Image (cartoon, rainbow, N blue to C red):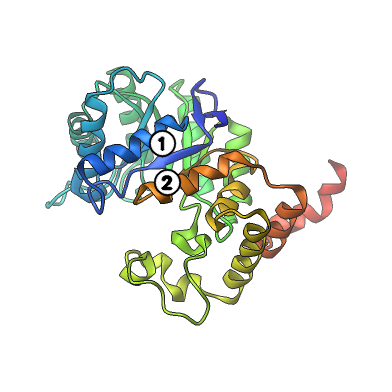
């Protein structure tokens, strides 16, 4: 397993991290603990969850596993807050009230004294960013969290947060969790460059595009019933959102590379992403041991330059103005 520094925190995270949203959804008890053991035994050390996953059950299952494993000081636990955690008007968002309540609930469910990486799950347009950031500072000073990060922020909001912390002499932002894959490459325009320039670790979520980059979906065929598309889990992953001609061209290249290397398609997708500039770790999930083993296999080989260029080319989305203008007239000066 490769390890990368998370921004400028000094923490080293495995290049493949494990998302635990499946815990408490279709994986429970010993089966869930088996998956967590497999991941750690393979050298993985970052486990990511959120207070809203499965009404808190994901944190509870992870906490039960952690309770009997106090001898794993290398493990880094990250959780998130923003989405609804119950009924009522103030059980969501990034208000100070909701964050304080959510932190205590997450600590209780996870059976830990402090959260290693506490992440704002989404930018909140209804709450003052200054209030949100000062709350993070208070939690660090209180010993409730060790580092904090952002997730699903625009470049301008992220940069505003960076400058706010810097000007106030407060703790810096440790990480940005962002959607990034062969199907979503817009982070390359500004989010990833800002992460690199400001020393912020990038955690890539949905690296397999909701299952589209695993090869499970076939053109002109109905999606498997036990799949995100088949179950209609998330609007963003439905065929009308993902299943365009470009997606099928990307899948065709993935399948060709996977066939030549005799590896699962998912490994090719993960391998392409984990070596991209600025990416600290790739966040993958699994619903059973075979799926986890297949995904972890991406750490055992490296993509060559020709394969990478093929995937770069077929997934290229171009750049809008002014990025394309700047690139066209300044690239030769580098």
Q: Measured along the vertical axis of the image, is residue 52 above or below residue 312?
A: above
Identify the image quadrant of residue 50.
Answer: top left
Relative horizontal placement of residue 31, taking residue 200 as reference (left or right): left
In x, y percent, where is residue 52? 25, 47
- Neighbours of disc 1 within 10 Å: few (<14), some (14-19), many (20+): many
Marking on residue 227: none
Identify the image quadrant of residue 314.
Answer: bottom right
Q: Residue furthest right?
A: 332
Relative horizontal placement of residue 229, taking residue 11 as reference (left or right): left
Circles 1 and 2, Cβ within 8 Å, touching? The answer is: yes
Relative horizontal placement of residue 261, taking residue 71 as reference (left or right): right
Q: Residue furthest left?
A: 88
Residue placed most toward the observer, 181 or 250: 250
Q: Quadrant of the C terminus?
A: top right
Q: Quadrant of the N terminus?
A: top right
Q: Is residue 204 visible?
A: no
Secondary structure, mark 2, is: helix
In x, y percent, where is residue 86? 15, 49
Task: Name the residue at 42% across, 30% down.
Answer: 41
Relative horizontal placement of residue 331, taking residue 68 as reference (left or right): right
In x, y percent, where is residue 184? 55, 58
Where does label 2 land, which residue?
Answer: 292
Residue placed most toward the observer, 220 or 181: 220
- Neighbours of disc 2 within 10 Å: few (<14), some (14-19), many (20+): some
Where does label 1 land, which residue?
Answer: 39
Task: Name the residue at 53% across, 39% down.
Answer: 159
Secondary structure, mark 1, is: helix
Q: Measured along the vertical axis of the image, is residue 271 above or below residue 182?
A: above
Task: Name the residue at 42% across, 51% down.
Answer: 291
Q: Measured along the vertical axis of the image, is residue 225 above or below residue 320?
A: below
Mark sitting earlier along the chain (1/2): 1
């Amino acid at each position: 397993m490769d390890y990368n520094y998370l921004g400028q925190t000094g923490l080293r995270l495995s290049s493949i991290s494990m998302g635990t949203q499946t815990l408490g959804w279709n994986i429970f008890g010993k089966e869930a603990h088996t998956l967590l053991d497999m991941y750690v035994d393979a050298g993985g050390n970052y486990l990511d969850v959120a207070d809203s996953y499965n009404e808190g059950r994901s944190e509870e299952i992870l906490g039960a596993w952690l309770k009997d494993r106090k001898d794993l000081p290398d493990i880094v636990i990250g959780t998130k807050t923003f989405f609804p955690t119950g009924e009522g008007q103030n059980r969501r968002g990034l208000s100070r009230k909701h964050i304080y309540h959510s932190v205590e609930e997450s600590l209780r469910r996870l059976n830990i004294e402090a959260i290693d990486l506490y992440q704002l799950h989404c930018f909140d347009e209804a709450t003052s960013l200054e209030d949100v950031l000062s709350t993070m500072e208070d939690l660090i000073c209180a010993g409730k969290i060790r580092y904090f990060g952002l997730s699903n922020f625009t470049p301008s909001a992220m940069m505003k947060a960076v400058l706010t912390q810097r000007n106030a002499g407060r703790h810096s932002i440790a990480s940005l969790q962002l959607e990034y894959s062969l199907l979503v490459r817009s982070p390359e325009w500004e989010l990833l460059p800002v992460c690199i320039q400001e020393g912020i670790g990038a955690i890539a979520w949905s690296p397999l595009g909701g299952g589209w980059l695993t090869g499970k979906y076939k053109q002109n065929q109905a999606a498997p019933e036990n799949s995100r598309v088949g179950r209609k889990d998330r609007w963003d992953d439905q065929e009308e959102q993902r299943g365009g001609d470009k997606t099928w061209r990307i899948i065709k290249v993935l399948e060709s590379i996977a066939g030549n290397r005799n590896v699962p398609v998912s490994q090719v997708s993960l391998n392409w992403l984990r070596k991209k500039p600025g990416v600290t770790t790739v966040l993958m999930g699994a619903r059973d041991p075979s799926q986890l083993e297949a995904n972890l296999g991406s750490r055992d080989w490296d993509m060559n330059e020709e394969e990478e260029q093929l995937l770069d080319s077929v997934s290229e989305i171009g750049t809008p103005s002014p990025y394309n203008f700047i690139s066209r007239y300044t690239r030769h000066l580098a």
